[in-house]
Amino acid sequence: MKRTFRRKSVRPGSKKRRKHIWLDTGSSYRLGYERGYAQGTAKGEEAFDQPFHGTSIVIPSYNQAEYLARCIESIETHTIEPYEIIVVDNGSTDETGDYLKKRAGQLRYRQLETNRGFSGGVNQGLMMAKGDTIVILNNDTLVTPGWLTHMLRCLKSNPIIGAVGPVTNYISGEQQIAVPYETVEQMWEYAASRDKPDETKWKETDRLVGFCVLFRRELLGRIGYFDEGFRIGNYEDDDWIIRVRLCGLKLVIAGDSFIHHFGSVSMKKLGQEQFHEVHGHNELYYTGKWGNPHVWVDEVKQNGSLFRNGNPSNAGSPSDFFPSHVVIRDQGGQQYFLYEGNKYPCTAMDEKMGIRPVVLSRLDIRSIPTAETVMDEKALLSVLKLPMDEPVEGQLVGSGDGIVYQWSKGCIRPFVSDFALERWNLKERSILNLSTERLQAAPHGLPVIAPPILQNPVL
């Protein structure tokens, strides 16, 4: 049956009323939007310091916009756990900036004015990360099904595990495996075939490469930032990993987690001459900073003073490897006197007095217990005035063999290198010479390591 509709008559003035109603609706919408935006902003500010119960994926990037886009697409396709993506653009000159602006809201990013290298980019991202767990990931990678699932399972299997890395087709060291594919298309078939959890493929190691490494948020507070004294790339991940091992935590390769790595794309763009220059500088910086780091790791294991009561939650932190009787400051200028494992707020020291504060990150400074009392200039100078006839707390001692120690609670603590001594501004301090026999008889405490150099003024 055909229906007929009667057209309603329009009363005079009805159009005007409709317009008035529409204006009221539009005004209400704007008011509601503004109110909702204000409430959302307030909630965001309220939750700013709250951790995100997921994984922060930090990607330092320099040029190579196409690789970055493919990397992020693979994360979005093959990651089932809650995550956030943080990209730090190291002053790229290609389309990276345009790409990031298009993706605003789907990821967080920071564009740096200059190339601060791998360490600088990672540190900026670590400072922004809010996740319970954090992944550092190269931009020239493609993650595959189960990549994060298997690594998280491995990390959470034992609290003594500090960091976990996957296996890959292209890297130095134990994480490289033989693969049957030659193209990226073939890689996806291979990756799909191995997406199975398999604890038998987990392997403890002494080294993880920074192209992809997963760790708990707590580890960042314990180990601190990457050293920005390294240029562009290479060795800075080795330096950070040594600090993880010094704190008594283990490193594990999760062999059931696979990612494809194109391999050092940004570094190769430097050109052969500049690459060798950067590599050579970083190698010298690393060896000058540590000497033989594996010797110090073994010595700490034998020392046994970490892991109080065998509990990994009590593992070491950077402050355990800092000296005593030095002035430190954060990048905001706040100074402290580091004394017997505590930091004492103190008045600003005049460098003309021969006391130069050592700049540490706020992260490192927060890891040091704060004393309740403030140390004024007079009290500080009296503590620094050490006798030179017998070793006392804080005194530098040696036997003339080139190794310098600090006397601490009846133990001697060796500086791992001349660089560490200089980094703590202790090069000019007087050294009390003791006999070799007396030094050998004294128990050894934890070594003193050099703190990271910082270039980023907000760390």
Image (cartoon, rainbow, N blue to C red):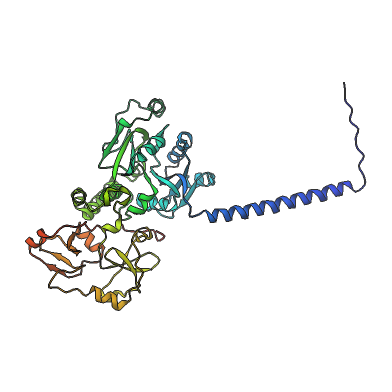
Q: Quadrant of the N terminus?
A: top right
Closer-to-camera residue (96/326):
326
Closer-to-camera residue (334/181):
334
- As displayed, is residue 286 above or below residue 371? above
Left or right, 23 with respect to 423, comes to: right
- As displayed, is residue 449 above or below residue 254? below
Q: Position of residue 450 (x, y in %)?
A: 26, 58
Q: Position of residue 218 (x, y in %)?
A: 38, 50
Residue 92 visible within the image:
no
Residue 165 visible within the image:
yes
Q: Quadrant of residue 67?
A: top left
Left or right, 19 with respect to 239, comes to: right
Q: Position of residue 317 (x, y in %)?
A: 30, 54
Q: Residue furthest bottom?
A: 378
Residue plotted at (90% across, 35% down): 7
- As displayed, is residue 350 above or below residue 410? below
Q: Residue furthest front?
A: 309
Q: Position of residue 72 (x, y in %)?
A: 46, 39
Q: Quadrant of the C terminus?
A: bottom left
Q: Residue furthest top?
A: 1
Left or right, 250 with respect to 457, comes to: left
Closer-to-camera residue (315/95):
315
Q: How many marks?
A: 0
Closer-to-camera residue (143/367):
367
